[in-house]
Image (cartoon, rainbow, N blue to C red):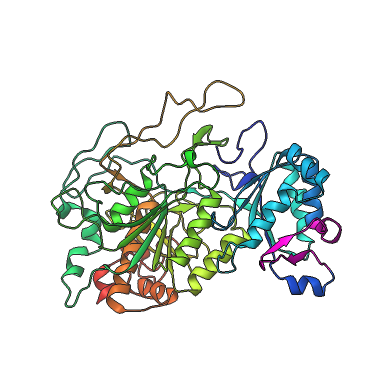
Amino acid sequence: MFFDHSPAAVQFHGETDLPQYHPCLLEVKFRNETERLESLGMGALTADASGATFLTRASATTLPGVGSMLAFERSGLIRRVIPLADPVAAAPVNVGPASAMRGAMAGGETPVLAALASSLRTPDSDPNAGASIVELFNDQDVDVLQAELAHDPSVESVSRVPVRYLVAKKAAKTKSMAGKKTKPKGATPMAAAPASGSMWNLARIRWAQARQLTGFKDATNIKVAVLDTGIEPDHPDLSGIVAGYEFAHPTNPNASSPRDIIGHGTHVAGTIAAKINNSVGINGICTCKLHAFKIFDDVPDWNSSRLLFQYFVDPVMYARALARCISLKVNVINLSIGGRGAPSSQESALFKRLLQLGVTIVAAMGNENSSIPSFPAAIPGVIAVGATTINDTRASFSNSGPHISLCAPGVGIWSTLPTYSGNSGFPPRATFPPQPDFSRPMLRDTDYASWQGTSMASPHVAAAAALLLANKGALTPAQVKLRLERSAVKVAPMQNQNFTQQHGFGRLDLVRLLS
């Protein structure tokens, strides 16, 4: 387990069904502005012979926030410090009281200073430069350290770390257009999907008609990034389409394998880009350059609200994946994740930079049937997608709110799943603190299955955005958002209104979008 989510140590902040913030975690970003600090008489940042920047022990007497971190370190309250920057340039540092004492007695860098220095040595081209996650042993110490860091002029930002989780729901028993019953996730392989021509979701967004438009271009040169649970690149319906796949864990290579254990990312990827008309399984919406990023590790986290071990987004893997999308110059990002915790300063900064650089970001509204904002869908500039049924009604679980852009099919959506077995979590054993009962996995289907959720709706719109960019040329994220909203179909439940907080500007229609 990457971070300590044990109930013996912490309680989650918030009273929702799922936690809002990671316990014991604090995100801090230091300014890399030597001249500014020196002009203020701080003198905490100096340059070594190579021109790199690092913190010295003098920081303890000149910068109150750094001094507080060192005091916490000497008291044995800090577990570790993990730089968010590229792992080649910035390595995590385990702290603990023994190593801290050794560093202090030797008069050199303590582990905390070494980790902060590592993050500051990162080139400014890395948007995570200077940012780290500090993990403490006890959650009650987080607010104290946050308040002290907030008064330090060398600290650019300091925030709680929000929890991000999946927004797919357990599959309901619905009927596809072929009349076949879908079924909940279980242990039985789903070797055959419905015929591509009977996929109701593709028919509803007029996928086939759009591909017949004069001058239609597929999205073969458009880079679409899926930040999710991973992907099975060798699935028969996905093989050869994945341009890149990154799944490295920030501290433990054994904690994140290339396998998509949950299957969620493979399902999302299939909706976007499963091979078209290959006589295997389903059809994806477009052919694109698919980049997959695994932002979940393989170790389930304790969810005290649901009394289950489930998988949450790893915040370091998430931040590094967003930064990689910048360096890879991706065109579209799909984020079928959510959470009610407000974005940290670094998450907000990464989204702002991506949008400024022309990256279209599509995110799922969330599945709580609530008007309480879920992030990242509610981050300004993001295209927030709700879910509709086969009858164009809002799915009963789909969130609403003034930030919604449009809706797309999200119930009874057939797509790819890994061909190997997997699970969505584990019940606890009868122990305290609880431990996962690995003998009772919550199994998922394999090969293909019908799932539902705004997680399933979002990739419809991400693929549509890729097709729009392929057919209409360079557009800003704001222009892509506007075209998707203006071309959406006003469905009957909207009662002729131009916009509702349940449907946004309407339901996705590819013909109207690309015409």
Does the stretch in magenta take in 6? no
Residue 90: percent from left, percent from top = 59, 55
Q: Is residue 277 above or below residue 423?
A: below
Q: Quadrant of residue 116?
A: bottom right
Residue occupying image coordinates x 80% and y 51%: 68
Which part of the image, by quadrant, shows the N terminus? top right
Tell me if 127 is positioned left or right of 177 in this view.
right
- Say if residue 320 shows up in the picture: yes
Which one is in front, 279 or 205?
279
Residue at the spot x=49%, y=68% of the render?
Answer: 354
Residue placed at 25% from the left, 63% from the top? 287
Instruction: Quadrant for the C terminus, please.
Output: bottom left
User: Image height check: is 119 above or below 506?
Assistant: above
| Position in image of residue 389 (x %, y %) | 31, 53
- Over which residues does the magenta segment extend? 42-65
Q: Give the camera-side residue of 489 and 280.
A: 280
- Farthest residue in the front direction? 49
Query: Residue 372 at what x, y percent from top left?
Result: 54, 55
Whether residue 311 can be seen here: no
Residue 443 figure quarter? top left
Q: Is residue 421 left or right of residue 29?
A: left
Along the line of sight, the residue nearer the viewer: 487 or 4: 4
In this view, 379 is above or below 282: below
Q: Position of residue 109 (x, y in %)?
A: 75, 51
Quarter of the view holding residue 102: top right
